[in-house]
């Protein structure tokens, strides 16, 4: 998660020994562990409260009833009410998609800049 290697941990430990002192490190580690334990409990308590809210509001049944996968449809039934696309010929060479002839090129507008 933090992408910390052994060399970084060793540097942190050495700095902690120099800054905090070797006799105070057990007290500090105890306080850090206690902080993370409380943080984990808060996360657990919040998830329990959300679960209780879901159960109280009957949202759990609604959540179970919703299918997030794509429903299997019968393609032939789905195509019955749809009209086929209009049949048109592709544009001829030199025409754009609107069917109009393009305007003649003005000298100097070529791809090579001539």
Image: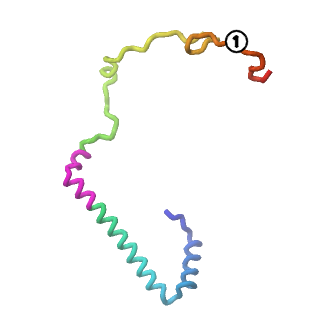
The tally of labels here is: 1
The C terminus lies in quadrant: top right
Percent position (x, y) of residue 99? 57, 10
Name the residue at the bottom extreme.
23
Percent position (x, y) of residue 65? 24, 42
User: Vertical placement of 69 versus 1: above or below?
Assistant: above
Q: Nearer the viewer, residue 56 or 26?
A: 56
Q: Main secondary structure of the magenta part?
A: helix
| Highlighted range, magenta | 49-63
Percent position (x, y) of residue 90? 55, 12
How many C-alpha atoms fall within 10 Å of the one at disc 1: few (<14), some, or many (≥20)? Answer: few
User: Vertical placement of 36 versus 48: above or below?
Assistant: below
Asked whether, in this view, residue 67 is left or right of residue 19, the answer is: left
Which residue is painted at 49% across and 10% down in the image? Answer: 88
Percent position (x, y) of residue 113? 78, 23
Residue beneath label 1, please? 104
As helix, strand or loop, the secondary structure at mark 1 comes to loop
Q: Quadrant of residue 37?
A: bottom left
User: Vertical placement of 1 versus 73: above or below?
Assistant: below
Asked whether, in this view, residue 17 is left or right of residue 114, the answer is: left
Is residue 114 one of those drawn in magenta?
Answer: no
Q: How is the image coloured?
A: rainbow
Which residue is painted at 74% across and 15% down in the image? Answer: 106
Is residue 59 one of those drawn in magenta?
Answer: yes
Name the residue at the right extreme.
114
User: Vertical placement of 62 versus 19: above or below?
Assistant: above
Q: Quadrant of residue 34?
A: bottom left
């Amino acid at each position: 998660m933090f992408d910390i290697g052994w060399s970084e941990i060793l540097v942190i430990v050495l700095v902690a020994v120099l800054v905090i002192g070797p006799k105070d490190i057990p007290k500090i580690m105890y306080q850090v562990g206690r902080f993370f334990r409380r943080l984990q409990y808060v996360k657990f308590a919040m998830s329990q409260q959300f679960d209780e809210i879901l159960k109280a509001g009957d949202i759990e049944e609604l959540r179970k009833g919703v299918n997030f996968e794509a429903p299997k449809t019968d393609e032939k039934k789905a195509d019955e009410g749809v009209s086929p696309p209009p049949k048109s010929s592709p544009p001829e060479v030199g025409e754009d998609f609107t069917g109009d002839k393009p305007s003649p090129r003005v000298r100097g507008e070529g791809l090579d800049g001539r």
